[in-house]
């Protein structure tokens, strides 16, 4: 997937400095790709966007904390994901246990309070969580419809003393 992303960037005539993907796992510091992620290039981001991925993470709070550490002062973390069934009121069947997507899902969504707590635990401020105004259509094997949210929080501004 990383190769395809990078190839698409090059086809758009974007240099590696402008747009690139790398493989890595912030939750497994002993992984073979971990050392690369400790380089200065992977810190000081103005914006980090996580889209439709957090529900695949076994420790979402820890990932949010690690991403927050990589933000620049006043940088924003934006997350787009699935609203928990308890708050979405969209009836959707659970995927069959042998479906590929079911095996990769760690959570079936997040509540507003889940997101606010994750942001607060990561030391982020000015958090906001908004639901997309209508259900999103997804493939039938994923339930047909999902309620998505947009969540954003910021790293506090550094003191200028």
Image: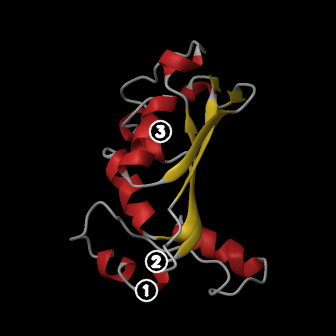
Residue 34 vertical placement versus 99 (above, below): below
Looking at the image, which residue is at 46% across and 46% down?
54
**Mark 3 and mark 1 residues within 8 Å of each other at the beta carbon:** no
Looking at the image, which residue is at 26% across and 63% down?
28
| x then y, percent, for residue 143 | 57, 23
| x then y, percent, for residue 92 | 55, 16
Residue 57 visible from this viewpoint:
no
Task: Identify which residue, 43 or 161, lies in the foreground.
Answer: 161
The outermost residue toward the right is 12
| Residue picked out by circle 1 | 40
Residue 128 visible from this viewpoint:
yes
| Residue picked out by circle 2 | 43
Looking at the image, which residue is at 62% across and 33% down?
148
Residue 25 vertical placement versus 32 (above, below): above
The type of colouring in the image is secondary structure
Task: Identify which residue, 13 or 57, lies in the foreground.
Answer: 57
Instruction: Look at the numbered disc 1 and give the secondary structure of its residue.
Output: helix
Looking at marks 3 and 2 on the same chain, the residue that comes earlier in the sequence is marked by 2
| Residue picked out by circle 3 | 115
Label 1 vs label 2: CA separation? 6 Å
Is disc 1 surrounded by few (<14), some (14 to 19) or many (20+) residues within 10 Å? Answer: few
Task: Identify which residue, 7 or 155, lies in the foreground.
Answer: 155
């Amino acid at each position: 997937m990383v190769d395809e992303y990078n190839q698409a960037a090059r086809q758009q005539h974007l240099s590696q400095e402008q747009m690139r993907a790398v493989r890595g796992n912030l939750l497994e510091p002993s992984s073979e790709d971990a050392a690369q992620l400790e380089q200065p290039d992977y810190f000081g981001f103005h914006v980090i966007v996580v889209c439709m991925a957090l529900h695949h993470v076994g420790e979402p709070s820890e990932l949010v904390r690690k991403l927050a550490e990589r933000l620049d002062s006043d940088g924003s973390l934006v997350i787009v994901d699935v609203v928990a069934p308890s708050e979405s009121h969209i009836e959707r069947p659970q995927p069959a246990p042998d479906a590929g997507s079911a095996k990769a899902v760690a959570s079936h969504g997040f509540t507003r309070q889940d997101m606010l707590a994750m942001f607060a635990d990561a030391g982020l401020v000015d958090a906001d969580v908004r639901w997309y105004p209508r259900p999103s259509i997804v493939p039938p094997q994923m339930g047909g419809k999902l309620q998505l949210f947009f969540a954003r929080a910021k790293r506090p501004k550094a003191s200028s003393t």
